[in-house]
Image (spheres, rainbow, N blue to C red):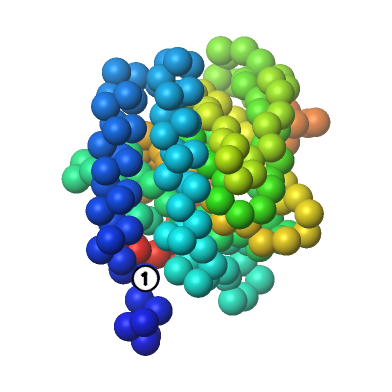
């Protein structure tokens, strides 16, 4: 790969590390709604750096994949994992959780609709969901999810997306996730490795 187009960027790493230190200072005491709101404001601030986060630095899929994920930060223990996702205009994800990880997703480029759900009951055999609302993630906007949060994601506007995805722990540590069918109440477990590759861009 031409070094001019290297995925590594020490200056970006420095700025990301500084932002993540601030976010950790908030989120280390837990994913309360209040903490998630503060973390969200900080991630929106970082996402405003379009000079760092753009399709030149984080290319879209060159095949029919829905998105490319680039890891740009995580702690040594795999916590506080931050990814840049470059998503194709047809991106769609059925309702799913994140393996008990809280999440903050902030927009850099393009809009996507997040429909939010929770499981209807604590009974592990009851896989029905209840709708909890909807958030449009766009530049200057973000969505937060607590560890039991479930979302369904639709790209909007028929144009590509670039967003920052921050999770309490990286995709590997999230392990198996649940994917739901809202109407039937059916659900299946899946592992993120089945969704395609993740590029280390630190
Ligand atoms: Fe998700």
Q: Which residue is mark 1?
A: 7
Q: Is residue 161 left or right of residue 159?
A: left
Q: Residues within 10 Å of mark 1 (few under 14, many from 20)?
A: some
Image position, residue 53 (x, y; %): 47, 59
* Residue at 50% from the left image edge and 72% from the top image edge: 56
**Splitting the image into 4 quarters, where does residue 161 fall?**
bottom right
Identified at 32% across, 49% down, the residue is 16
Quadrant of the rendered image containing residue 100: top left
Res 142 visible: yes
Residue 132: where, in percent of width, then height? 69, 20
189, 23: nearer the viewer: 23
Give the quarter of the image for residue 21. Answer: top left
The residue lying toward the viewer, choosing from 24 and 191, is 24
Q: Pick the quarter of the image with the N terminus.
A: bottom left
Is 25 on the left or on the right of 149, as rendered? left
Q: Is residue 180 visible?
A: no
């Amino acid at each position: 790969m031409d070094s001019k187009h290297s995925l590594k960027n020490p200056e970006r790493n420095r700025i990301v590390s500084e932002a993540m230190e601030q976010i950790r200072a908030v989120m280390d005491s837990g994913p309360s709604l209040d903490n998630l709101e503060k973390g969200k404001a900080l991630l929106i601030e970082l996402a405003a750096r379009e000079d760092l986060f753009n399709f030149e630095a984080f290319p879209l899929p060159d095949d029919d994949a829905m998105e490319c994920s680039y890891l740009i930060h995580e702690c040594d223990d795999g916590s506080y994992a931050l990814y840049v996702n470059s998503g194709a205009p047809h991106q769609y994800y059925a309702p799913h959780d994140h393996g008990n990880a809280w999440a903050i997703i902030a927009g850099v480029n393009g809009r996507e609709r997040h429909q939010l759900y929770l499981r209807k009951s604590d009974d592990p055999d009851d896989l029905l969901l209840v709708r909890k609302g909807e958030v449009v993630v766009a530049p200057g906007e973000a969505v937060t999810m607590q560890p039991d949060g479930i979302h369904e994601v639709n790209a909007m506007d028929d144009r590509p997306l670039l967003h920052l995805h921050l999770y309490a722990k990286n995709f590997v540590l999230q392990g198996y996730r649940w994917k739901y069918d809202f109407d039937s109440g059916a659900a299946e477990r899946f592992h993120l490795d089945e969704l395609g590759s993740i590029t280390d861009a630190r």
